[in-house]
Image (tube, rainbow, N blue to C red):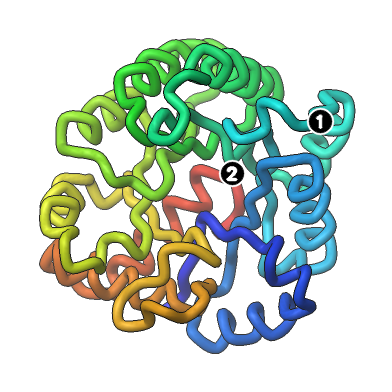
Amino acid sequence: MKWFDTHAHFDAFAAEGSVAAVLARAAAAGVERMCAVGSSEASNALVVQLAREQPGALVAAVGYDRDQLDRPRDPEKLAALAVDPTVVAVGEIGLDYYYSPDTAPAQRALFGQMLAFAAERKLPVIVHSRCADDDTIDMLGEFSTVWKKVFHSVEKTPPPGILHCFTGDAPFAEKLLAQGFLISFSGIVSFNNAGPLREVAKLVPEDRLLVETDCPYLTPKPFRGKVNEPAYLTRVAEVLAEARGGEPAALAAATFANACRLFQLEG
């Protein structure tokens, strides 16, 4: 079995000098490819550097996330990174009203800028959404419409993006699927209180499903208390396969193919 971790943060691993060890453990676990995700000036530069150094294992995503509202953002630097051949998506971007609902207008403005940036470059988006379902759906609906126009001359339109680390309900999932998005599940699906989320996971068609770690966060059971890393993706997948009543091998094949289709990579 080979796996594709569609969402991994490498900032902490790079800071402690453990990237090589983390990648080695991932390879040993069958996690052959990973998307290294940026969200800020520093992390965007880092993920492109790492993807250049590890072309067989890593691809990169760059963008400005909602926590960058009051931090330096250089559109020219981002544009220069986005044309690098290692960059396959714009992200992590999105909305999160949980801690700071007062910044919602500014978050929407930045999110809108990032969606326009992605459409101009024909790059899919990696989206975060928390306590912002309605605004997320509205803005992604507009993006999906633009995306279809951008690819109007292509025989088959590629997916417009991912709702990563999905924790929403069935209606939210159904609206995302109707807009053409893929849905990715993280270690949260293994948590004791995640029964409702596992029920939603059953509803996602196999060709729209992805898996991720969102490392170093959200370590799956039974590894809680340890730093999450791509090698633990197999545990996320085991739980997801069990919830869906399928085999991990079939899930591995489907999610790997889905990730390659989304990122427009050869399988």
For label 2, the residue is 264
Label 2: state its secondary structure: loop
Determine whether label 2 and label 1 are within 8 Å by CB: no
Looking at the image, residue 103 lies above or below residue 223:
above
Image coordinates for residue 109, horizontal then vertical, percent? 58, 13
**Kind of residue sitting beneath label 2:** Gln
From this viewpoint, is residue 152 visible? no
Residue lying at 16% horizontally and 57% vertically, measured from the top left: 198
Q: Is residue 247 left or right of residue 25?
A: left
Answer with the quarter of the image where residue 20 lies: bottom right
Of labels 2 and 1, earlier in sequence is 1
Q: Could you say whether the residue bearing mark 1 is in a helix, strand or loop?
A: loop
- The relative height of residue 93 versus residue 213 in the rendered view (above or below) is above
* Residue 111 to residue 12: above or below: above
Q: Nearer the viewer, mark 2 or mark 1?
A: 1
Q: How busy is the neighbourhood of tag 2: few (under 14 within 10 Å), some, or many (20 plus)? A: some
**Cα distance in 3D space between marks 2 and 1:** 30 Å
Seen from the viewer's position, the closer of residues 24 and 104 is: 104
Amino acid type, label 1: Pro
Q: Residue drawn at (34%, 55%), measured in percent from left and top?
A: 185
Q: Dot 1 surroundings within 10 Å: few (below 14), some, or many (20 or more)?
A: few
User: In the figure, residue 27 lies in which quadrant?
Assistant: bottom right
Marking on residue 133: none
